[in-house]
Structures are given as structure tokens and as C-alpha cells.
Amino acid sequence: MRRTIRLALAGLLTTVVHAEQSKATPVAPRAALESTQGAWSTGVYRNLFAERGHSAAEIDAKIDGAFHQLFFGDSATQSIYRVQADTSLALIESAGLTTSPDMGAAMLVAVMMDRPEVFQKLWKFAKNQMQNTIGDRQGYFAWQVETTPPYTPLDLNPSSNAEESIATALFLAARRWKGHAESAGYQVQADSILWYMTRNDRGERMHSLVDSARKQIVFAPAQTGSLFTDPAYHVPAFYRLWSAFATSNSGPWKEMADSSYALWKRAEHPVTGLFPVLSTFDGIPKLAKSYAQLDDTGELRYGDTTFDVEAYPVGGNIAVDWDWFRSDTWAVDHAKKQLGFFASQVGGYKSQYTLSGVALDTQASVGLIACNAAAALASNRGSDGSFAEALWNAPIASGDDRYTSGLVQMLSLLQVSGRFIAYGSPGLSVGIQEPSRAPKSFSIRQSGGLLQVEGVEGIVRLLDARGRETSRAKSTGSVTLAAPRPGLWIVEAGANGTRKVLVAP
């Protein structure tokens, strides 16, 4: 099955994004990297593009331009977003069909780009045209559907990563656009998807998306597909989010996050850091794809399984959990191992390898460039910033390549610029009420531990690095706050709750 790539970030130069903001603002270097708390608690997200010297205006233009091209550009060569004759519906085209993983990825992009109207059209299509309503697949989303009415399903079976993305996008949308009439049901629908994912009463031919004994996502719930997994489908940051946001907190979400790390540590190649396309629940690569060559005797000898497009997302999935939760320092070690391997490739790295590092192709891949940039967010090695620069320099996917790489590239741009945000998390203390409203600006002058905040109107709060309030004041012009101790501090001011981060001496 096709995979949708989900990626994320961690911190040197950082970006603080309040729940009302969709633009990134670079702040003190090394703050997020040195923090023992992830962005879930601090609201601080790494911005690799800013670290490489790109200005806020340049980054805004890069992100906005990519989104406009992929969603509203020329329909023949650029865009993949298709509003239907019924203008309340929209889908993502993938060379003549639409897939549930692409729909889930596009819904995540819409949340991060603050486009509730795009999100609602995509979700309505997925809900009404892709979600099975009867039979042993009830609640699952059909993997492939035609792009023209009556939108006939081409494959009713689900792709497990689609349910993961769609549920997460709904949870985030319910919090980012809290108060919008259209978002009232997003929480309910996300809860419903999680319930359907863990149902074990589907009969002999269709199973749960979660192996209840091993606490792992399965490759596919149909027949033998439930007997193994896909390392790229493991997204512990999402599972931890579900544990916090699900109305009924009875799912095995935290256990699944721990199981994902256990799987990754076993499945990772010890030298290259590469992952197989498929593996057993114990992390043993499955020989789903192999390469072969003649040995010295002329006999055909099979090597190990391949690392290719379907395994690209793993490094980013590891990075998002590190950035959001700082749950396991192994994530940093892995990022440096994987990126070190790719940096060592003479003449640039290719699109496909054996797990032990033998190149199987001569071409580069935009998708892998994007995924490696996201993986770099978990690295504390300065030279790995070059992977972000490679993403910056790569043209936005167009032509046929946009169907396979466009959403991957868009998500990576958001993540590497610090804009893949855990809306509703403790680090973002208030939900979005009017996401399109521009926040008012204010300035801060420092004198030792005293902070003079100018140009504010309303409540001003001082928060520590974990997002906990230490003091507050009300002002219509300026106010002075005192930082209790040296370190990273967050000032939140005004009706829109705009945030800025600084380091008090």
C-alpha cells in the first residue's frame, strides 16, 4: 500500500507558535535543544530554516508558495487539490484516483496552514465517500476511490496509516478551530475512528488495526496483513496525543508509543540506521522486497530487504516524538546514524538501498530529501542542517512527481520551519477562536531579570519553559514583569495571546 509520510522536529534555534499564530518567529538559539521538555509542554518548535540564515519573510514565502502551488496552482501540472461539482466536497487527486493516506496528509496540512474551509471539504469527502458504513470493514476508510461521481471504491480495505493521520487531524482541528460551527463534531469523529481501529469483533477475514497483544499497529487488518507491521506506520507522537485528547482514555495508546520504540530499536540496521519496508512485530525484516546479484560462483544470491520510498517516513516519525515529548534520547542517536550514512554517499545519496547500504538506484528522490530534512530535526549535530538546506533548494514537486512527493514535501516544509504544531497541548495555553485574525504585536525590553513589555492591551502573562504561569498583569500600554530566575521564559500578551520567547540572564 502507498504510505503517507508524517514527520516532525526538535530544537536549536527555535520557533514559538501560540495557538493563534501560523507564522514562525525565531527565538533564542539552543533553547529547545537544551530543554528537558518537548514542544508539547513548552510550545517551542525548532526552525532549521532560520538556523540556516533564512529570514522570516523568506520562510513565509516558501511555505505559502508551496501550499498555493499544490492546492491552488495550475490543475494540469501543479495542484492536487480538487473541489468537486458539489463545492462542499474536495479530494486529493493521485493520478486518476484518491487515496485515504493522501486525504489524511492533506487534512494535516490544512490544519497547520489555518485553512478550515479546505479541511472541512476534505473531511466531508473522506467521511461521506470513503468511510465504510456496513460489514466487517465498518468505520474503516477505503484505501482507493475514483475521483469522479459516484466515487466508486477501487479498494475497500483500509491503509492503517490513513486512519492514524485522519484521527490526529480531527483532534487538532477540534482544538485549533474551537468555536467554529463546522468543527463541533471533529472530536466525536476522532473518538469514533479510534474506537473502530481497536474493534476485535470483525470476523475471521477482517481484524483490528491494532494488535492487542503486542500493542502495535498492523500493516493491514485483512487476513495475513494483520500478522506483521510496517515501521513507517508507527507514530508514537500521535499515540501520546490520542492518550491526552481522546474522550475515552481507555485505548492502549501509551503502550503503543513504547512498543514503537522497542520495534524501531530492533528493526534499525546497526550501521546504516536504515529500516525495512515491512517487519515482524519483533523487528525482523520481512523479505517482501529483495535485491539479487550473482556471487563469485555465478549463483543468484539474495541480499537483505530494501529501504525505499515506503520506509522513508521512519526517521521523521522518530523526530516528531522527540520534538514533542523528548521521550527517548535514542532518537538523537538514530538521527545522527541515519543522516551520517546518507552524508557519506559519494556523489549524493540515491532513492533505494539495501539495509546494509548498497545502492539499488542511480537517481535521487525528492521524497527522501524531504524526509531526511525532517529527520534532521532530532539531530544535535550542526552539519546535519545541510539536509534542511537541500529541502529548501529542491523545487516544489510538479508534473507526475507531485502525486507521489507533493504532500511529503509540503509536510516536511511545515515541520522543518517549526509549523507542525500540537494544537491543544499544554505549551499552547488557549485554543484558537479566530484563526484568521492577525495577532497584535508587542515589544520587550530587558534589564537583568526585569522585562518591560510595551504595546499591549489586556492580560500579560509570564510563563516558564513548561508553559506554567508564574505571574500576570493587566495593561493598556506597558507593564513590567520580573523573571524569578535565569533561563527560558515565554511572554504572552494581548487579546490574541501572542507569545514571544526570551532568555533572562
Image (tube, rainbow, N blue to C red):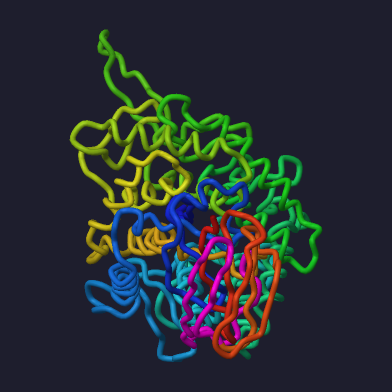
Position above or below: 478 against 350: below
Q: Which residues are magenta?
A: 427-456
How many tags in the picture?
0
Residue 249 shown left or right of residue 341 in the figure: right
| In the image, residue 275 above or below residue 156 | above
Q: Nearer the viewer, residue 70 or 295?
A: 70
- On the image, the x and y values in percent for residue 234 come to 57, 48
| Rendering coords of residue 191 (x, y %) | 72, 69
Identify the main secondary structure in magenta: loop
Residue at 49 percent across and 88 percent down: it is: 437
**Residue 92's quadrant in the figure?**
bottom left
Vertical placement of residue 457 versus 22, above or below: below
Is 427 situated left or right of 4 in this image? Answer: right
Q: Residue furthest top?
A: 297
- Residue 466: image quadrant is bottom right
Q: Examine the rendered structure and indicate whether residue 302 appears above or below residue 46.
A: above
- Residue found 71% across the figure and 76% down from its top: 188
State the residue lying farthest toward the front: 447
Q: Position of residue 329 (x, y in %)?
A: 57, 38
